[in-house]
Amino acid sequence: MSGLLSSIAGAFRAPGPRQPRYIGAEDAALIDGWLMGGDDKGAFSLDQLMELAGLSVAQAVAKLYPLGPKLDKDPNGVKQKRTNERVLVCCGPGNQGGDGLVAARHLYHFGYSPSVFYPKNTPSAPQRLKKQCENLGLPLIAPPSSGASSFPMAPDAQDVAFRRAIENTDVVLDCVFGFSFKPPARAPFKTVLDELAKTSKPVLSVDIPSGWDVDEGDRDKTGFTPDALLSLTAPKKGVRAFVESGGKQCVSLSLVFHLARTDSRVCALPSAASSAGASSPSAFPPPPPLPSREHEHTADPRAPPRRAAPSPTSSSSTCQSTRPTGAKLSTLRGARSEASVRLARGA
Ligand SMILES: NC(=O)C1=CN([C@@H]2O[C@H](COP(=O)(O)OP(=O)(O)OC[C@H]3O[C@@H](n4cnc5c(N)ncnc54)[C@H](OP(=O)(O)O)[C@@H]3O)[C@@H](O)[C@H]2O)[C@H](O)CC1
Ligand SMILES: [K+]
């Protein structure tokens, strides 16, 4: 086994049963590198990993902020918004921003009305993912794809647009920075992070609350605490205090399944048996059977007629509560999971 794979395995090594497992920024980057490496490594493409991560993010939204029932139009014939329908997806310049674009697309198909704030173009920006959002007609605050400028609007105008967007949403998705953030935040994201800290809307942060140090948490006293967190692959060290103080947390296990399937020694590690907040000694389940060939997409009666929407709970996913109090375990249809989100709610 290569040194890199040893490092990955080490990242999952358990200090003891039933303990949350946290990894640092360095290990997270190593896992990423291994997943995308060729030869004896994972051989995944970045697009694949983003798709799995973004689907997990959308599933976490559906679990934590379920879409309310469809409502009749008001007396003036105006369509009424459903509970939690509007989701503002805040995307950063790195891969986490790509996860956000993927999540927005899936949320749309789940029946939500996502809008996307993607304020910075970089040479590596996932233009195809952005185009897919445009093709769905999602409101997008972003520079033109071909534009050289990172700032399509005067900075003030961009800030105003973001504040308006946050006022007009039900739920905020924080896909701004992941494990490669190096404080302090630079423009145009300083304003975004300040607004995330100020808003009273529920914010679901992906991987690490943006602005926090991946290893040390809210070291710089940003004042931002999300309503909930989705950890990708494994919780990061910086969220330990958030989780241990009872913060709502989901863990996406989709990549763990792939790691486990790829190398049985990783699968066998006891550390894989323990995710943050998990009460079960085998919180990371064994690898699922081979993915189903026939996808279990069923029509969602709640979905708008303009599209045949699969219910988030009928896609190939598993989602369950691991609350130590024995909260209801809800296993969703399609247990042959390619993308799996485990919900671990704090007490
Ligand atoms: N294996 C997995 O679990 C996967 C996770 N994914 C997601 O990807 C992120 C990590 O992606 P990465 O691109 O490495 O990093 P970030 O998304 O955090 O963003 C890096 C960009 O942010 C810029 N940056 C960094 N610090 C600042 C700052 N202080 N102010 C402004 N901008 C900043 C940075 O720019 P530089 O010029 O500094 O390089 C980058 O542009 C992970 O958390 C998951 O969400 C993958 O999608 C799949 C696999
Ligand atoms: K984040």
Image (spheres, rainbow, N blue to C red):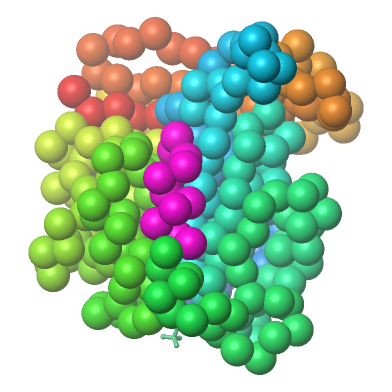
Of residues 238 and 253, the one nearer the viewer is: 238
Q: Is residue 326 above or below residue 112?
A: above
Q: Which residues are magenta?
A: 161-172
Residue 337 position in % (x across, y down): 66, 32
Residue 16 seen in the figure: no
Say if 106 sits above or below 41 in the image.
Answer: above
Residue 128 located left or right of residue 347: right
Q: Which x, y percent locates residue 95?
A: 55, 68
Is residue 123 within the magenta segment? no
Q: Would you say 62 lies left or right of 189 here?
A: right
Residue shown at the point (11%, 64%) measured from the top left: 221
Write the residue at 42% across / 64% down.
160
Relative horizontal placement of residue 312, taking residue 208 as reference (left or right): right
Quadrant in which the N terminus appears: bottom right
| Residue closest to the far front | 76
Q: Position of residue 272 (x, y in %)?
A: 41, 43
